[in-house]
Amino acid sequence: MSVNPAHQPAVQLLELGAHFALAERAAGIGYWRHQLTDGTVHWSPGLYAMLGLDPAEVLPQSQLLIERIHPDDRTQIATAVAEAIKGRKPFNYRTRSWNTDDPERTFDTHGDIQCDETGRVTAVIGVVREVTAEVEAQRTIKDREAAYRFIAEEATDMIIRHDREGSFLFVSPAVKSLLGCEPDTFLNEPRYARVHADDLAMVQRVLLEARESRKTATLTYRMRHNDGRYVWCETRVRFVFHLATGAHLGAISVSRDITEHKHFEEALHAARERAEFASHTKSRFLANMSHELRTPLNAIIGFSDILSREMFGPIGNDRYTDYARLINESGGLLLDLINDLLDMSKIEAGKFDLHPEDFAVGNTIGACVRLLSLRAESRGVTLTTRVEPADLRLFADPRAFKQILLNLVSNAVKFTDVGGRIEVAAAIAGERLRLTVADTGVGIPAEILPRLARPFEQATNDPARAHGGSGLGLALVKSLTQLHGGDFTLESKLGHGTTVTVTLPLRTPNTQRAA
């Protein structure tokens, strides 16, 4: 389609206007022009859209534009334009919108002066761009920076910002309390100047690994205080990377003084070593003494048994026979105590080995009950057993199982009065054997229960206690149970009796050993 040459300028002007409108929309800007020679005002479509006005309904007016600007910003506009006209130079200003019905918006205006060939100012023009989002973002950043700075300055931990090379960009005032120096002094020091020489290689290695793996590093090391001493510090370092490119930008570290905690740990470790040494010494002493006592005790038990049985002829007086029997029984009790001491010392020293084998639970329970039946009868106590199923078998250390049984039943007999009952029961519970020894004895106060399974602990520390005992029985039972990978529970009610439950795996590993 051809265009009349006479209309060509008009067409070009329309095309130019269309191109300008497109550029306005793309850039998000508006344009105004105030012609000083005749007072006419022009607003571009972009400015109308920015102001939310319809060109068909509202004529462009400078006063209308000023009325839409916050009152506090109007003076700066007049000043900026006046200075621009006077100096024949561009001008810039930032203003806020003034509309009670809408949220506050922010605009930047970049303007200039137009003059004729004589230098007379003929028009003032301005390009307006809304920067509300940018201002809000900057305000948010400033608020966050202020909050972070407040936290950093008030925190008792030392906070440091590092650049990508590791140099210090910022250090919080806590550096003074931690290291005794001013922040400005610290910022001018080399990165590792205060790190203890023995810790330097570790610190560098951990930081390098953390940066490469992009993980937070936690370090414990020493830093030199201004007074020359070294302070133990715990430091967490987080590296910062560019979200888009992944480039390393720097790091933030937080350090705290853990010197007191470190000294406490060292004291605790030393105390633990002393306690372990004392425990091993005690165990060795008990083991040695137990062996030394066994030899004469075996002689006492053997000879007293010969005397009580009158194997080499009558003694001649029944009282001597009774005394010999008492000596034999007392020797047997003392030997049991020594055996318990020896086993307990082996367990504590980690030298008690289990030798599991398959055996019939019912037969073992029956044998142990028979050993204690006379003692139960002499106290007027009924002792019964219940094994379900009758052919129940267990793969465990038979000697340890007997010790568990004898200690539990012996305790029950000891603390059950005339007319009382004791039941020894064994049954399968899933993949485990549940062994229960329940009595109707004197019971145990609730506050005493937690300490009864500790070595040498008893329900009473009264030297004149009526039931005697070393306090090793339950401790040994619990230790032997745990060696088998089992559980030990104790339930009791004062005046109503006690129930001890031991659960053991039906099969105990051959390699189980005290640790």
Image: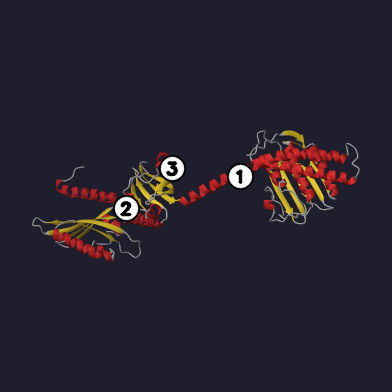
Q: Of callouts 2 and 3, which one flags the residue occurring earlier in the amino acid sequence?
A: 2
Asked if the residue under mark 3 is in contact with the one under mark 1, i.e. CB atoms within 8 Å, the reply is no
Image quadrant assignment for residue 443: bottom right
Image quadrant assignment for residue 358: top right
Residue placed at 56% from the left, 47% from the top?
271
* Residue 95 or residue 190, whichever sits in front: 190
Q: Of callouts 2 and 1, which one flags the residue occurring earlier in the amino acid sequence?
A: 2
* Residue 61 or residue 465, whichever sits in front: 465
Residue farthest to the front, as pictured? 316
Work out how far the residue at label 2 is from the one at label 1, CA to CA, in angstroms: 52 Å
* Residue 279 or residue 306, whichever sits in front: 306
Can I make out residue 485 in this image?
Answer: no
Look at the numbered disc 1 and give the secondary structure of its residue. helix
Disc 2 target residue = 184
Work out how far the residue at label 2 is from the one at label 3, CA to CA, in angstroms: 29 Å
Label drawn at residue 215: 3
Viewport quadrant of the N terminus: top left
Residue placed at 71% from the left, 34% from the top?
356
Q: Residues within 10 Å of mark 1 (few under 14, many from 20)?
A: few
Residue 461: percent from left, percent from top: 71, 54
Disc 1 target residue = 278
What amino acid does circle 3 point to? Lys
Q: Is residue 101 left or right of residue 302?
A: left
Q: Of callouts 1 and 3, which one flags the residue occurring earlier in the amino acid sequence?
A: 3
